[in-house]
Image (cartoon, helix red, strand yellow):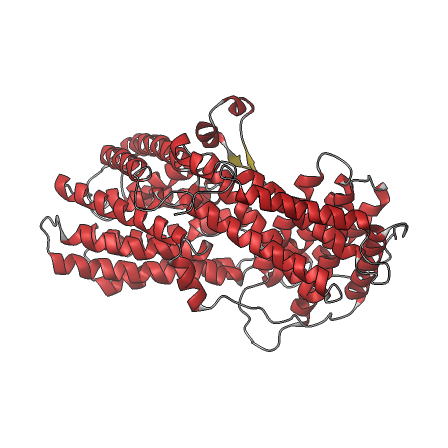
């Protein structure tokens, strides 16, 4: 979770956000991969071809930024698809440079980069992997057009792909710490994600009736999302898989009824006996160990929530004690038409247009300056304009501070050492630091600055620490200006689109619970969709609230909509647990609360101050 410094609460939201950083244990396996990712660069230097290692190191660096915790097979898409996009971008950029020539281009390059920015920016708004693909395409197109390397375009693209592929291979092959002790190491990330779900269920049950219940429910929803993503990677065989994988999928599915019962008990607001939390905790230990769970303590069946918890524990125990589990069900995906439709939605057009203006403007300014590293300016704006790196003002401040710190550090080191091998060592060290540095954008910027400046020297270009600072400051100014321009349409599309999606998901969930409560599989899928959509909307609202006032005012009041939506989804879950006994029906108190929450959501959504502005 992002954690601010204590005094940050007294600062404006846009400034306080710059002090927030992710907390958590050091991912030592990712640190090792980051250091080993410099191996292709080392080989090229030892072979006296350092320029050939530069594209490979760039590919490894960009893949390292996307190397996040999760399942191994899910990382194939998370790292592989952006790498393919970056490789294509590098080749395209080289071809564009050959077509334009070596002189200044005040029309062609800004126009081409602007069109590419419009398309890539719109696609980037459709998801995390799409965002990484769009960013890598734009960055590598600019680098391919501007970085003077002797290798031809196709070779550059292959070297870039080889560098990213090397890191992906390390991700798939190297075991995680402790992974060999509890089963096939290829599933250790998935096992940890599923175990985290049961830990979150236990924590939510322990927080029931206390002030931490809401945070516990949000943590459970996040754990379910992460496990779903970890288990969504491709299989080697389409229609069959190993017994270990079937067992893991079955154990993940067995967590759904437990999560539903825990949410209903937390909604009721009554403290629970301490022994109740032990059952899900033992299930988490069994997931990590890869074995059966043994006997579980049963709660007293005094109300619907405890009865549902007891039945969920019994079903989970049966699944855990089964030798193989049941095979996983099919996984649906988004169609290409759906992705294209979301890309060209109001939110996609707004983001794409701002990326296009940033790319075109920064390229024009860079061409007017006409210096050796002109490509740094548009490449930097591409990173800065990404909204998933934080609010605009926050990432601009962090970028400026991080670039100055990184350039100063590199200048000091370069004054003490010389030769290619120390530069390779610097790249390896930066690769090792990158998995931890991604927790704060300023630290990540400092690490990437040292890495890029090292690659510049290895590529045969002159030292450029001061130029890097100037280019970054120019990019900060460009993105800050364009991010607040009154472009066609009105602001707040991203928040409105996220809330629209969440409201529709909540109503689908509610309708199914009232019409077909006996269909548990469909109910579980709709509940996951509702909570996941709510989490996305909350993230968009928090991001918008931390912008400068001129931007944040466009989504003012959205938090009240999200609050009403959260109450409705939680109450729907409690009603679903009650309706598991059809003869009893829905208690009048639950029906009244459900109607009240629906009315509250309608009022919050219709209020002029609460609803984000429409175009």
Foreground pick, 595 / 470: 595
Residue 131 located left or right of residue 196: left
Location of residue 60 in the rendering, given as x and y in whole percent from the top left corner: 38, 53
Which residue appears farthest toward the bottom when viewing the image? 239
Asked if residue 151 shows in the view, the reply is no
Q: Quadrant of the N terminus?
A: top right
Residue 138 located left or right of residue 264: left
Foreground pick, 337 / 201: 337
Foreground pick, 25 / 473: 473
Which residue appears farthest toward the left when viewing the image? 103
Residue 402 located left or right of residue 117: right
Corner quadrant of residue 567? top right
Compared to residue 270, the image places residue 318 above or below, namely below
Label total for image: 0
Location of residue 3 in the rendering, given as x and y in whole percent from the top left corner: 55, 33
Compared to residue 374, the image places residue 292 above or below, namely below
Corner quadrant of residue 192? bottom right
Which residue is at a point 69% across and 42% down the rendered structure image? 216
Residue 519 located left or right of residue 584: left
Which residue is at a point 22% across and 38% down the rendered structure image? 463
Asked if residue 574 shows in the view, the reply is yes
Location of residue 302 in the rendering, given as x and y in whole percent from the top left corner: 90, 50
Compared to residue 29, the image places residue 328 above or below, namely below
Which residue is at a point 12% across and 50% down the rendered structure image? 105
Location of residue 8 in the rendering, given as x and y in whole percent from the top left corner: 51, 25
């Amino acid at each position: 979770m992002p954690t601010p410094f204590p005094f940050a609460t007294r600062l404006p939201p846009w400034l306080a956000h710059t002090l927030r950083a992710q907390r958590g244990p050091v991912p030592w396996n990712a640190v090792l991969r980051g250091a080993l990712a410099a191996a292709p660069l080392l080989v090229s230097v030892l072979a006296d071809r350092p320029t050939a290692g530069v594209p490979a190191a760039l590919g490894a660096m960009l893949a390292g930024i996307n190397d996040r915790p999760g399942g191994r097979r899910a990382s194939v898409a998370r790292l592989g698809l952006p790498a393919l996009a970056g490789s294509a971008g590098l080749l395209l950029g080289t071809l564009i440079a050959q077509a334009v020539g070596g002189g200044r281009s005040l029309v062609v390059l800004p126009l081409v980069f602007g069109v590419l920015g419009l398309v890539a920016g719109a696609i980037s708004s459709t998801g995390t992997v799409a965002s990484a693909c769009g960013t890598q395409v734009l960055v590598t197109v600019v680098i391919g057009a501007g970085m003077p390397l002797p290798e031809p375009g196709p070779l550059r693209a292959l070297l870039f792909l080889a560098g990213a592929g090397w890191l992906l291979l390390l991700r798939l092959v190297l075991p995680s710490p402790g992974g060999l002790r509890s089963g096939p190491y290829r599933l250790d990330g998935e096992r940890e994600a599923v175990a985290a779900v049961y830990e979150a269920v236990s924590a939510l049950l322990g927080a029931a009736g206390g002030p931490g219940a809401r945070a516990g429910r949000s943590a459970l929803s996040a754990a379910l999302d992460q496990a779903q993503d970890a288990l969504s990677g491709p299989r080697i065989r389409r229609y069959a898989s190993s017994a270990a994988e079937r067992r893991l999928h079955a154990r993940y599915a067995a967590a759904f009824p437990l999560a539903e019962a825990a949410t209903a008990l937390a909604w009721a607001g009554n403290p629970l006996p301490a022994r109740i939390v032990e059952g899900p905790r033992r299930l988490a230990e069994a997931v990590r160990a890869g074995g059966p769970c043994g006997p579980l303590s049963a709660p007293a069946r005094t109300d619907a929530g405890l009865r549902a918890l007891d039945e969920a524990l019994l079903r989970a125990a049966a699944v855990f004690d089964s030798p193989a589990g049941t095979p996983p069900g099919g996984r649906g995906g988004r169609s290409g038409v759906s992705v294209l439709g979301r890309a060209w939605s109001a939110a996609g057009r707004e983001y794409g247009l701002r990326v296009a203006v940033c790319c075109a403007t920064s390229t024009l300014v860079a061409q007017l300056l006409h210096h050796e590293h002109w490509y740094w300016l548009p490449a930097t704006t591409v990173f800065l304009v990404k909204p998933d790196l934080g609010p605009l003002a926050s990432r601009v401040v962090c970028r400026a501070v991080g670039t100055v710190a990184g350039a100063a550090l590199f200048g000091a080191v370069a004054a003490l050492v010389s030769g290619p091998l120390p530069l390779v060592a610097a790249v390896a060290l930066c690769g090792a630091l990158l998995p931890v540095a991604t927790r704060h954008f300023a630290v990540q910027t400092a690490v990437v600055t040292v890495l890029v400046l090292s690659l510049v020297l290895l590529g045969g270009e002159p030292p450029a620490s001061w130029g890097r600072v100037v280019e970054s400051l120019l990019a900060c100014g460009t993105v800050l200006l364009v991010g607040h321009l009154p472009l066609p349409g009105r602001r707040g599309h991203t928040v409105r689109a996220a809330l629209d999606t969440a409201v529709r998901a909540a109503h689908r969930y509610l309708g199914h619970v009232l019409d077909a409560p006996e269909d548990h599989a469909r109910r579980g899928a709709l509940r996951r969709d509702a909570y996941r959509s709510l989490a996305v909307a909350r993230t968009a609202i928090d991001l918008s609230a931390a912008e400068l006032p001129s931007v944040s005012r466009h989504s003012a009041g959205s938090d009240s909509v999200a609050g009403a939506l959260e109450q409705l989804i939680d109450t729907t879950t409690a009603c679903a647990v009650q309706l598991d006994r059809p003869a009893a029906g829905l208690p009048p108190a639950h029906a009244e609360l459900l109607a009240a929450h629906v009315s509250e959501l309608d009022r919050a959504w219709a209020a002029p101050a609460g609803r984000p502005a429409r175009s």
